[in-house]
Image (cartoon, grey):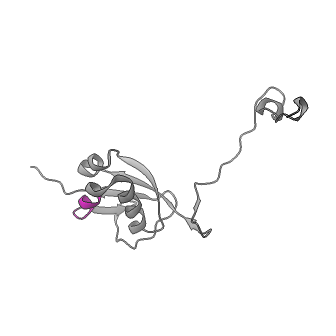
Amino acid sequence: MAADARPASAAQLGPPGGVLPTVAVPARRRLSADGYHVGVANLRLFASAREAAGTGRDVVPGTTVREVLEAACGRYGHDFAGLLEVCQVWCNGEPAAPNTPVRDDDEIAVLPPVSGG
């Protein structure tokens, strides 16, 4: 590559003083293989669900609660999947059925049964 054909650096592309303008970034959006929008939910895991997954929070794609949980099972494995059978699932603070639609940035909470006194 010739010396004058090198790509410009960020400093060369920016305004004088090297400060780039702030640009609004659109909400997280993902596309499926066929080009359709796939929602992205904020998954919250509590107690034994958090222990099985190894994390208390994640961002997981899906357009329904079922799809979000299936994606989570794929990430966290068999122990997590088995635990879901006894957990309650909530979407944005309300009990959720598997077919509940999920929009970008909805919060899906997985709540295992609580014992103790």
Residue 71 in sight from this viewpoint: yes
Residue appearing at x 32%, y 49% in the figure: 53
Residue 111 in sight from this viewpoint: no
Residue 99 sits in which quadrant? Answer: bottom left
As displayed, is residue 26 above or below residue 21?
below
Residue sitting farthest toward the left: 117
As displayed, is residue 6 above or below residue 50?
above
Which of these two is toward me, 12 or 106? 12
Rendered location of residue 101, percent (x, y): 45, 70
Residue sitting farthest toward the front: 1
Q: Is residue 17 left or right of residue 50?
A: right
Q: Main secondary structure of the magenta part?
A: helix
Q: Is residue 56 left or right of residue 7?
A: left
Rendered location of residue 65, percent (x, y): 40, 66
Residue appearing at x 42%, y 49% in the figure: 58
Residue 83 sits in which quadrant? Answer: bottom left
Rendered location of residue 50, percent (x, y): 29, 48
Residue appearing at x 33%, y 51% in the figure: 45
Residues rendered magenta in the picture = 81-86
Residue appearing at x 62%, y 68% in the figure: 35
Which of these two is toward me, 22 or 37? 37
